Amino acid sequence: MKVTRRNFVKLAGMAGLVGLAGGLIGCGTNSASIKSVAEADKLPPAEKATVYFSKTIDAEHLIALYDKINSEITGKVGIKLHTGEPHGPNILPRDMVKAFQAHIPNSAIVETNTLYGGARSTTERHRRTLKTNGWTFCPVDILDEDGDVTFPVRHGFHLSEVAVGSHLTNYDSLIVLTHFKGHPMGGFGGSLKNIAIGCASGKVGKRQIHREDWVTGNELMERMADAGKAICEHFGRKIVYINVLQRLSVDCDCMGMGAAAPEMPDLGILASTDILAVDQASVDMIYNFPDDRKNYLITRIESRGGRRQLTAMAEHQMGTKNYELVKID
């Protein structure tokens, strides 16, 4: 099947039906595997993680949260965020990200090209979209501009390796700065989705995760966990996660101007050195919201089987679902 934006949206709808049923039933430039540069830095998951929280979404509080978790971030730093389709209404505020990036020495925004056709499917188109969306205040490294390299997946559910943008190996540390929101195929897009799909190369890695027939439901979540595990293990302690719960649409920023308007209010920012804890805390914050405005987003998560992302990460020992929420304001 030719992958286009139309097919992507159509398959996303199919994913909802598959995920709902599941819920009711319970070409790169370098094909050699890249050994983790952080082998000595690997740690077993903690019994309980700390997740820092601010209800205020602005540059000052984003920086304050980052400073709580940045002790291992050194060297050349990539800031992985979703820069969005042209004029997307829900992407992270550029002024906030600009101030954040200026706070981090030797840093650049990192992105990859898309698998589906459109405004970010080639490097040339992608760079035009970056300009349109205002990502012009610092370097933006399109990681797969020069192809991909292969990261091993140890004991994966489905993958034994994943192709990531080759430039990713140029970075010593990675900050995963995520606009947490719904997603048409994943149910929700948190830190896992941001690195698993977001670091995978556009034409190879993303196809490995989605498969030729665009897999849905639990298998998609498990494939994302496989890819995310490879990236987490590559960086070891030198990777941190920040989820911004703002403009909580049921749709991803890949939907651009077609993304649904949010029904929930903004909730705040969560930050942790534990990927599972920060995504679990984000989902918990949605589910624990005190009124029915949460229902549209919860339905999206449930209908796609999105919570399998969390259990798959737990089974991969990528972190812990047990966390202490520490408020900074």
Image: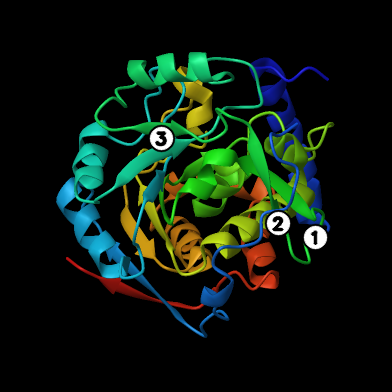
Q: Nearer the viewer, residue 159 or 295?
A: 159
N-terminal of the pair, mark 3 or mark 1, is: 1
Give the residue type at disc 2: Asp
With 89 as the anchor, is 227 left or right in this view?
right
Q: Residue beneath label 3, please?
A: 262
Q: CA distance from mark 2 to mark 3?
A: 30 Å
N-terminal of the pair, mark 1 or mark 2, is: 1
Judged from the image, the secondary structure of the residue bearing numbered disc 1 is loop
Q: Nearer the viewer, residue 28 or 25?
A: 28
With 80 as the anchor, is 70 left or right in this view?
left
Q: Residue at x 24, y 51 (%)?
A: 105
Q: Residue beneath label 1, please?
A: 157
Q: CA distance from mark 1 to mark 2?
A: 7 Å
Tell me the tag on residue 226: 2
Figure quadrant of residue 186:
top right
Q: Nearer the viewer, residue 259 or 117?
A: 117
